[in-house]
Amino acid sequence: MAALEIEARRALSYQRLKKLALALLFAAATAHADEVLIRPAPSWVDRIAADTNTTVPNNDIRYGIFTLLDDHQVRVTDTVVDYQRKVRRVLTSGGVQNASELSIDFDPSYQNVIVHHVELLRGGKRIDELPHAGIRVIDKEDESADRIYDGTRSALIILSDVRPGDIIDYDFSREGANPILGGKYADTFDLTTSTPTHVVRHRLLWPASRTLHYRNFEPRIETRGDERVYVWEQHDIPPIDVEDHLPDWFDPYTHVQLSEFASWTDVGQWATAMFQLDDASRAAVHRLAQTIRASNPRDPITAAIRFVQDDIRYLGIEMGRNSHEPHQPAEVLEQRWGDCKDKSFLLSALLRELGVEAYPALVSTRLHHELDSQLPSPFLFDHVITQVIAKGRTRWIDGTLSDQGGTLETIDTPSDERALVVRDGVHALTNIDIDPHATTRIEQIYTVRDYVSPVTLEVVTEYRGGDADAFRASLVSDSISDIARDRLNRYAADHPKIDAMGLPQITDDRDRNVITMRERYRIRELWKNGEWSYTARAIAAHLQLPERRIRTMPLAFDYPLDVTERVTLRLPDHLAIDEDHDEVETSAFRFTSKVKSDGNAIIALYHLVALRDGVPAAAVADHLIKLNDVNDSLALSIDPQRDAPLLTKAQRTLRRHVPAALLISLLVLLVPAGIFLHGRPRVSGNYRVE
């Protein structure tokens, strides 16, 4: 299961573990030398004709391909056979590039791949490509950059001499049932495609003695002997148009949900059976709890959380059963690494040993509250956290968040919204009450001695809660010098002639989960053409407009979010600016701004807080209008000449002209006096000199 965040440290150990993972993959490949076979399709497959004369929807063509038939058939017995046939017309040279390598993903721990036929249809003739096609099996490992190795492999069929106008017709099967499900079945059948498709069909042969649950689309159903046959079929499907900036929980794809799990109780029982401590783990956890109590008598709970988060590094070897079944805590403690489920299993056992009620909890970092609309299935979950019940309150801990701040009472809650707690007697999903403590406060002070000399800029940024966690995580991989360069270049976007007056000063109160950073800069030529402009960029970064403005899908908004920017401009004299106060609110955010003058200072305060993580499609237009209003409010322009009141202008005039007038007056007085003194006799001692 994928983690929310990946620990980014101990590079040397990581490289050693990476070599180990690759060795395991090689061993798996050796053990499955016959994992790709060539033989005819199973007799139960219902082969239908692909309509090669159908009209090409030229206006909808993507990737240079038109799919004539996408046929998927599954037979469930004591195992699972998954058959697929694809017939594609190649229309362009780009289509040749995109369609000439056929890829079949599979899990070699329980699946074999059988290729049935690969043909080219050209000029009414069928060309058997299988004898000439090169078939290679490669390790896929899409998540290796996140330190997750699941053993997935890809069988690549590389075609030769494919030309525009050809039709590629191929089919294959994957044989094998995932043993982690304990003989049950769950899946989703997609009814959307990335290319225009003439026919999409899903056909399921199901034992009549077993109960199947399905949702979203009604199938055709017929009974054949001791099997029921379910068919979902659609025609002339345009390519899916996925809009940008979608909330995580929104699924733009149309699919049929299938599950043999009747309820969340069934899924809970399935999970509970996997999270059972063995005797070695009980003993190891007991010893660890004693050590933590002895070394941290005041707060052993926080110490236990930090041990799992910080001292057990993140690495997922998720092959075979360990795609969903955790490793035993004794093994995790010995190797000092594990993935999300390993860490949650260890943490919950450790906290219980310390006298606190705690359980692993399955969550979806993608679906969140949309789990409520799904058929119960183990495959819906992609992460495991820990539920902790202490002093009458329920809290949620993510064991994969290394260097997280706070204590059990103040630690930031994961924003997953729903969880299936792994314990006996659970019959439903549990709501996760999100109580975010994440805030960022930025204080900027510009000190202007005059309108010519360099200006001093002092910046104090305070991160709290989840924002402190995120910044602390960046300190793992970024040096202070890296951060200094990044910050300097950010400010240079508005102030090209800026210099840092030393490195940033960073203090971290991990128990309170507060990080403070102080910076000092010198800015030359701040007053471009006599004017200074400011934009609250930390807030503006969260208010970017999407590429797709006219939408049929919801628009994501950063959540949780609470950002304040306060800028103070200390001037040599008073300026009469137009004081302003704005408030803008949508279903997703609330924004306030206030600009005022206070003596010789101008103060602007901007505050943005998120209310939810998305905007419904119907409300996007109004939301974007208000985004534009906010972006207008984020700009502040100061012109010392334009904004100076009459009194300030008079004072400036006096400062410029009065010294010269005084000099002239003094000269008028001193010149005659000099002449008078020059004309008088000089006296030296007791003598007069003529």
Image (cartoon, rainbow, N blue to C red):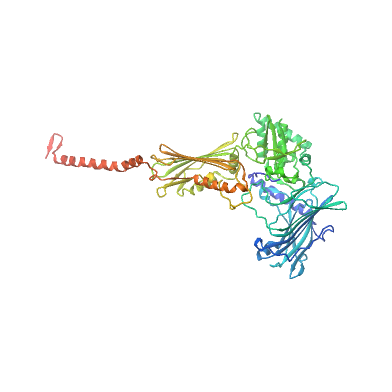
| Position of residue 441 in the picture relative to residue 40 (left or right) | left
Up-down relation of residue 487 to residue 135 (above or below): above
Number of marks present in the image shown: 0
Q: Quadrant of residue 333?
A: top right
Is 642 in front, or is 113? 642
Question: Where is residue 423 shown, x and y percent of the image?
Answer: 76, 36
**Residue nearer the viewer, 9 or 568:** 568
Q: Quadrant of the C terminus?
A: top left
Query: In the picture provided, is 442 more to the left or to the right than 100?
Result: left
Q: Taking 79 as reference, is 308 above or below it?
A: above
In the image, farthest residue toward the left: 690
Res 484 seen here: no
Quadrant in the picture for the N terminus: top right
Q: In the rendered view, tell whether residue 218 sits above or below residue 668.
A: below
Left or right? Give the position of 550 relative to 647: right
Task: Measuring from the top left, give residue 559's x and y in whole percent.
Answer: 61, 42
Q: Is residue 648 visible?
A: yes
Q: Position of residue 296 (x, y in %)?
A: 65, 31
Q: Is residue 433 left or right of residue 209?
A: left
Q: Residue at x 66, y 44 (%)?
A: 4
Residue 291 image point, x, y percent: 69, 32
Question: Residue lying furthest right in this view?
Answer: 225
* Quadrant of res 440: top right
Front residue of 116/60: it is 60
Residue drawn at the location 29% of the way across and 41% of the way down:
658
Q: Quadrant of residue 266?
A: top right
